Image (cartoon, grey):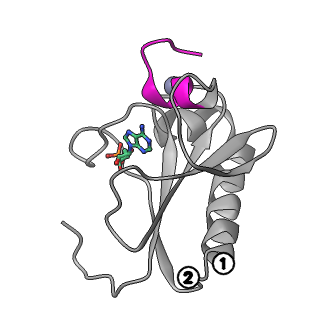
């Protein structure tokens, strides 16, 4: 747990969030500032700064995060959806705790912003 980290604080129950899913490794929550009708986040329970760190140290967790994100999309009724992992400032990452975005419920556009 990183006391400075907003997602660690959500996982610790110090900051409220709408939690949809929980297991030993990840937590699924609703994004507080939705960019689509469905906007969920899959957070690792353990603090990793980004997917770069997860991919280097725990490939199984990287895969699990994608699998859970896909399952939550289906459960939310958005079989057709977009998963996003922003990495680093140029990648658009604003919270330095690894997370996978689930976006759905509207037509996605390409290229992304
Ligand atoms: P990123 O820009 O990829 O790092 O995504 C961070 C996401 O976290 C954004 O979509 C924010 O809206 C979301 N977020 C920030 N604070 C909270 C919070 N307290 N509860 C839920 N989602 C949050
Ligand atoms: Zn954290």
Asked whether 41 or 97 is in front, the reply is: 41
Quadrant of the snapshot with the N terminus: top right
Where does residue 24 sit, x and y in percent of width and height?
81, 38
Where does residue 10 sit, x and y in percent of width and height?
55, 31
Residue at 56%, 82% in the rendered image = 78
Relative side of 104 to 33, left or right: right
Let me know if residue 7 is in the magenta part: yes
> In the picture, residue 47 is in which quadrant?
top right
Where does residue 111 sit, x and y in percent of width and height?
22, 76
Quadrant of the snapshot with the C terminus: bottom left
Q: Dot 2 surroundings within 10 Å: few (below 14), some, or many (20 or more)? A: some
Residue hosting label 2: 78
- The answer to whether the residues at label 2 and label 1 have Cβ atoms under 8 Å apart is yes
What separation in Å lies between label 2 and label 1 (alpha carbons)? 5 Å
Asked whether 95 or 18 is in front, the reply is: 18
Let me know if residue 38 is in the magenta part: no
Residue at the top extreme?
Answer: 3
Give the answer, above or below, for where 78 lies relative to 18: below
Residue at the right extreme?
Answer: 24
Q: Which mark is residue 74?
A: 1
Residue at 69%, 74% in the rendered image = 75
- Which segment is the magenta one? 1-10
Q: How many marks?
A: 2
Asked whether 4 or 18 is in front, the reply is: 18
Residue at 75%, 39% in the rendered image = 25
Residue at 21%, 44% in the rendered image = 90
């Amino acid at each position: 747990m990183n006391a400075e980290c907003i997602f660690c604080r959500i996982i610790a129950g110090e900051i409220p969030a709408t939690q949809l899913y929980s297991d030993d490794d990840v937590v699924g929550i609703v994004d507080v500032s939705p960019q689509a009708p469905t906007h969920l986040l899959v957070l690792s329970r353990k603090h990793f700064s980004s997917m770069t760190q997860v991919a280097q140290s725990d490939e199984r967790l990287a895969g699990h995060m994608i699998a859970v994100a896909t399952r939550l999309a289906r459960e939310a009724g958005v079989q057709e959806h977009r998963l996003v992992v922003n990495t680093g400032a140029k990648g658009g990452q604003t919270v330095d705790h690894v997370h996978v975005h689930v976006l759905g419920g509207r037509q996605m556009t390409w290229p992304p912003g």
